[in-house]
Image (cartoon, rainbow, N blue to C red):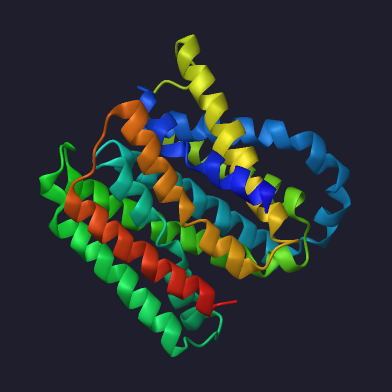
């Protein structure tokens, strides 16, 4: 539980680090993933034998997961600069609702009434946040909110693509493969746009490394480790703390005060996520 608390605090810094950086979003995402791979590689090498279990179908799933993760990073990173931190982080956290729908459609996991109610509440809160989007001081809040929702859908695809593979392959070898595919997809995206890959000032490199070490290693990797020791429902619900932490950090560091309707819509979204997660143990 202590590790889980640290992990939630670490992922809460992600949007703040993105906002503090002036680099294009493609290179930013590429270096976050690349530095995460480098930081995890010494541990992943110890479990490399489990990669022998990665058959053709599992390899395809890992590739799809990596591509979906790359698209998630691009859409969500772009969202942070267009809407408020509170709206962006809250909307991208609706991922459990999309996982539930995708699992019902693709994995034959039926939705119970409580899950459907939770999804409805979460989406209703998202709609409320979108209605009040223009009340904030963000440059393009409606576009930013839609990009955050797209990021949530893609994050759900990433989870669904890797669900069956993770039953046969250990965490670190699996994420190393997925992150490598993700980094390759992001590099192709950066080169296609013509953005610089390496020419950035020192403070940008520190931000890239911070994104990998904080949200990447101390955040998501520790959360995955915690799943071996804490009920998945507890882990899922604890992630509701990320929008709260990010909003407080944005208030203190960026001086960003969310509009009242954003706070109300966010509370509705988080309530829906709680209901959805606790219904899918």
8, 82: nearer the viewer: 8
Horizontally, is 226 left or right of 86 in the view?
A: right
The location of residue 279, given as percent across then percent down, is 51, 79
Q: What quarter of the picture does the N terminus occupy?
A: bottom right
Horizontally, is 153 left or right of 103 in the view?
A: left
Q: What quarter of the picture does the C terminus occupy?
A: bottom right
Horizontally, is 233 left or right of 74 in the view?
A: right
31 shown above or below 237:
above
- Number of numbered discs visible in the structure rendering: 0
Residue furthest top as drawn: 201
Quadrant of residue 21 within the rendered picture: top left
Observer able to see residue 224 = yes
> Residue drawn 22% across and 52% down?
262
156 shown above or below 46:
below
> Residue drawn 43% across and 77% down?
101
The location of residue 159, given as percent across then percent down, is 56, 62
């Amino acid at each position: 539980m202590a590790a889980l608390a640290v992990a939630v605090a670490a992922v809460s810094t992600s949007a703040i680090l993105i906002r503090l950086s002036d680099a294009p979003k493609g290179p930013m995402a590429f270096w976050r993933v690349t530095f995460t791979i480098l930081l995890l590689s010494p541990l992943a090498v110890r479990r490399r034998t489990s990669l022998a279990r990665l058959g053709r179908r599992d390899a395809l799933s890992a590739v799809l997961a990596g591509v979906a993760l790359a698209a998630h990073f691009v859409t969500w990173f772009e969202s942070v600069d267009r809407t408020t931190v509170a709206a962006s982080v809250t909307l991208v956290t609706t991922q459990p609702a999309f996982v539930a729908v995708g699992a019902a459609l693709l994995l034959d996991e039926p939705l119970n009434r409580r899950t459907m109610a939770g999804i409805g509440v979460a989406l209703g809160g998202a709609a409320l946040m979108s209605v009040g989007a223009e009340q904030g001081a963000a440059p393009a809040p409606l576009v930013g909110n839609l990009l955050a929702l797209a990021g949530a859908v893609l994050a759900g695809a990433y989870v669904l693509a890797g669900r069956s593979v993770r039953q046969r392959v250990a965490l670190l070898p699996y994420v190393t493969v997925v992150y490598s595919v993700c980094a390759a997809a992001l590099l192709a995206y950066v080169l296609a746009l013509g953005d610089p890959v390496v020419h950035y000032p020192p403070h940008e490199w520190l931000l890239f490394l911070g994104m990998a070490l904080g949200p990447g290693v101390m955040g998501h990797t520790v959360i995955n480790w915690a799943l071996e020791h804490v009920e998945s429902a507890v882990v899922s619900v604890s992630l509701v703390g990320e929008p709260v932490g990010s909003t407080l950090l944005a208030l203190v560091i960026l001086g960003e005060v969310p509009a009242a309707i954003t706070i109300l819509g966010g509370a509705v979204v988080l309530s829906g996520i709680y209901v959805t997660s606790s219904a899918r143990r």
